[in-house]
Image (cartoon, helix red, strand yellow):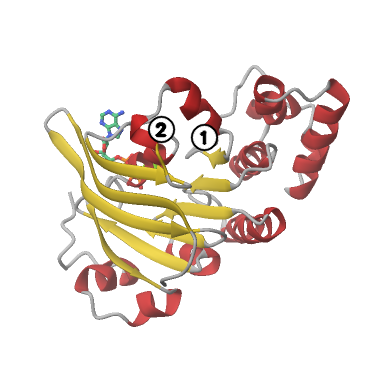
Amino acid sequence: MSGRDVVISLRGVEKSFGAQPVLLGVDLDIYRGESLVVIGPSGCGKSVLLKHLIGLIRPDEGSIRINGAELTEMDSSSLYDVRKKFGMLFQGAALFDSLTVEENVGLGLVEHTKLGAKEIAERVAESLRKVGMEHAARKKPSELSGGMKKRVGLARAIAMNPEIVLYDEPTTGLDPIMADVINRLIRSLQKELNATSITVTHDMTSASKVADRIAMLHEGRIVFEGSVEEVRTTENPIVQQFVRGEAEGPIRVL
Ligand SMILES: Nc1ncnc2c1ncn2[C@@H]1O[C@H](COP(=O)(O)OP(=O)(O)OP(=O)(O)O)[C@@H](O)[C@H]1O
Ligand SMILES: [Mg+2]
């Protein structure tokens, strides 16, 4: 993969919470314009890893570079500028219940841009249209189903035209058809926005549909990187157990 443009680079990233080590030295390069999926069992640290990329969690050790700039050394104002490059779909959507759908989607535009009310309204409408949720603009999150909330979360993630979009478990808890809708959206948004997308999931169907490349996180490290086909055919026993969904194997079930 030499010669490709690295947009995010992690080296030796370590993170513990109290006595619990979660990341034990993560090394990973993410290339511009690709769709990378990080797979791994529940609780292995996928959400924690994703939050490191936008500086919501700081590592104990190691380096995280975004477009060559060291995230771990940034003050809050530089971090703020870096975050504007990102859109993130949080696990569970994380919408504000007191705001309407359109207010949720427009929040970043109101707070982080100098756009006027009319331009913001247009951008919000366009983002909602991309995810097929324009009809729900005036609703509150409590009036929406899980799949609808995910789509609104997606609209919010893309409203700022991000360079990099992070998706945390975008299909978990959705029926297979809605999951497919979301998977297709992730793909079309990557192409339409020319964005780099990073998805973490334990849903192998979603991973196969969304990924240009798959990395597996296990016991605090990236233990495998490869194409969808390589994930399917590898003899790596950790990857095999995960892909086949077997209780027996090197992955210990807690
Ligand atoms: N802010 C925090 N404080 C303390 N412990 C945390 C914190 N965030 C995560 N952890 C712990 O880190 C570990 C990894 O959590 P994480 O949410 O990253 O798992 P995950 O791989 O995303 O799991 P899932 O697939 O279920 O979403 C868990 O044991 C969790 O309890
Ligand atoms: Mg998670």
Instruction: Give the amino acid type for the residue marked by disc 1 in the picture.
Output: Val
Q: Is residue 148 above or below residue 75?
A: below
Residue 94 image position (x, y, % from top left): 53, 30
Q: Which residue is mark 1?
A: 82
**View quadrant of ligand 1:** top left
Q: Using residue 47 as the reference point, say whether residue 114 is left or right of it.
A: right
Q: Is residue 105 above or below residue 177?
A: above
Q: Is mark 1 within 8 Å of ligand 1?
A: no
Where is the N terminus found, in terms of image quarters? Answer: bottom left
Q: Position of residue 229 (x, y in %)?
A: 43, 80
Image spot of residue 92 (x, y percent): 50, 37
Relative to residue 45, is residue 210 drawn left or right?
A: right
Q: Are marks 1 and 2 in contact (CB under 8 Å)?
A: yes
In the image, residue 245 lies at what x, y percent?
31, 67
Q: Residue at x 85, y 34 (%)?
A: 122
One can see residue 147 in this view: yes
Quick one: SS at disc 2?
loop
Q: As shown in the figure, which amino acid type bears the numbered disc 2?
A: Gly
Please, what secondary structure does the residue beneath circle 1 have? helix
Residue at figure coordinates x 38%, y 58% from the top left: 29
Using the rendered view, name the quadrant where residue 248 is placed: bottom left
The local crowd at label 1, few if under 14, some if 14 to 19, many if 20 or more residues have their Cα within 10 Å, is: some
Does residue 40 show up?
no
The image quarter in which residue 62 lies: top left
Q: Left or right: 94 with respect to 122?
A: left
With respect to residue 254, does 4 lie above or below? below
Q: Which residue is mark 2?
A: 55
